């Protein structure tokens, strides 16, 4: 285990200089974890549009009630991983066994794994909630779907995509430089919306011309998870940034200015 010295004044974590082999291994781990996390996200994006299959595990139940319970469990697993691993207490525990530079990569790796598990074991449900027949409406919904997921991607770069995805941390570790936490900023869409990434996900999930019952249940459960997850995220951000975030929360809407 690396020895870590925390410089709280400069918000810097300094680890004993690791060997080149260890630095290379952590860099490779970060790249692999990034690929796994992005791969899981890509699958769920395509699945939400009906462009990729879900629920093709041989372990399928014939009961609708059982299928709903299984799906609830899968989304609960997804939500627990994303919520628990994002908490500061869990991060402190994890970095007792891993270099701090690998913490975010581990989060991404586990996110990819639980996403694959949820989509693979998802229990399909029969029926449709809506199916839009108008060509103009279909085009409008597909456009909104594409814009929603694109907005999510752009929002990751509005903060720092490479920090968010753990690549900056493992790269700094590889070149043997200390990691410094990024300051609180209000870049681009963050000047109008506190959670543009979540807004993009919500638009992408719901703006589809054909809403199957299976998709509808998944969208509802993930929407509930987003609401719960934002509560914990905002609590953590308030603890981390204090009055700066409290002012930001008063001034900026959660999703859309003037609405919510």
Image (cartoon, grey):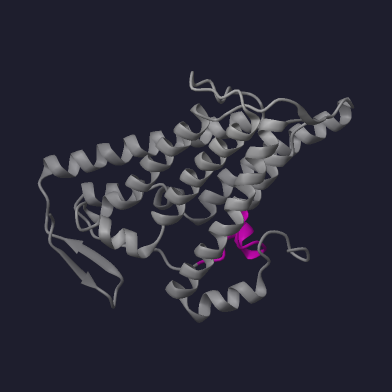
Give how far across and how far down residue 100 sits, in percent: 26, 56
Q: Which residue is rendered at x = 86% and y = 32% of the image?
A: 137
Question: Is 229 displayed left or right of 34 in the figure?
Answer: right
Q: Does the magenta stretch include residue 172?
A: no
Give how far across and how far down residue 225 sits, in percent: 57, 51
Q: Can you say whether 70 is above or below 237 in the image?
A: above
Assign the C terminus to one quadrant of the image: bottom right
Stretch in magenta: 185-196
Q: Which residue is rendered at x = 50% and y = 70% of the image?
A: 235
Q: Can you say whether 10 is above or below 217 in the image?
A: below
Q: Does the magenta stretch include residue 192?
A: yes
Residue sitting farthest toward the bottom: 243
Q: Which residue is rendered at x = 32% and y = 59% of the image?
A: 91
- Residue in front for this viewpoint, 158 or 89: 89
Q: Can you say whether 193 is above or below 26 in the image?
A: below
Question: Is 172 displayed left or right of 211 in the figure?
Answer: left
Question: Is 6 displayed left or right of 32 in the figure?
Answer: left
Assign the N terminus to one quadrant of the image: bottom left
């Amino acid at each position: 285990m690396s020895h870590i010295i925390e410089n709280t004044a400069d918000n810097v974590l300094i680890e004993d200089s690791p060997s080149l082999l260890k630095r290379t291994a952590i860099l490779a781990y970060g790249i692999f974890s990034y690929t796994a996390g992005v791969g899981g996200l890509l699958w769920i994006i395509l699945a939400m549009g009906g462009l990729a299959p879900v629920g093709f595990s041989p372990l399928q139940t014939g009961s609708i009630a059982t299928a709903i319970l299984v799906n609830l469990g899968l989304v609960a697993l997804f939500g627990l991983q994303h919520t628990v691993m994002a908490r500061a207490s869990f991060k402190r525990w994890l970095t007792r066994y891993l270099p701090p530079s690998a913490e975010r990569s581990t989060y991404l790796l586990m996110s990819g794994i639980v996403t694959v598990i949820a989509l693979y074991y998802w229990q399909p449900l029969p029926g449709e909630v809506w199916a839009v027949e108008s060509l103009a409406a279909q085009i409008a919904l597909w456009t909104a779907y594409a814009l929603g997921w694109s907005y999510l991607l752009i929002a990751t770069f509005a903060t720092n995509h490479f920090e968010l995805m753990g690549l900056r941390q493992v790269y700094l570790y590889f070149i043997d430089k200390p990691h410094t936490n990024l300051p609180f900023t209000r870049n681009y869409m963050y000047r109008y919306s506190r959670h543009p990434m979540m807004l993009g996900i919500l638009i992408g999930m719901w703006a589809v011309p054909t809403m199957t019952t299976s998709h509808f249940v998944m969208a509802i459960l993930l929407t509930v998870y987003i609401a719960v997850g934002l509560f914990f995220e905002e609590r953590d951000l308030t603890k981390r940034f204090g009055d700066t975030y409290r002012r930001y929360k008063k001034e900026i809407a959660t999703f859309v200015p003037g609405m919510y």
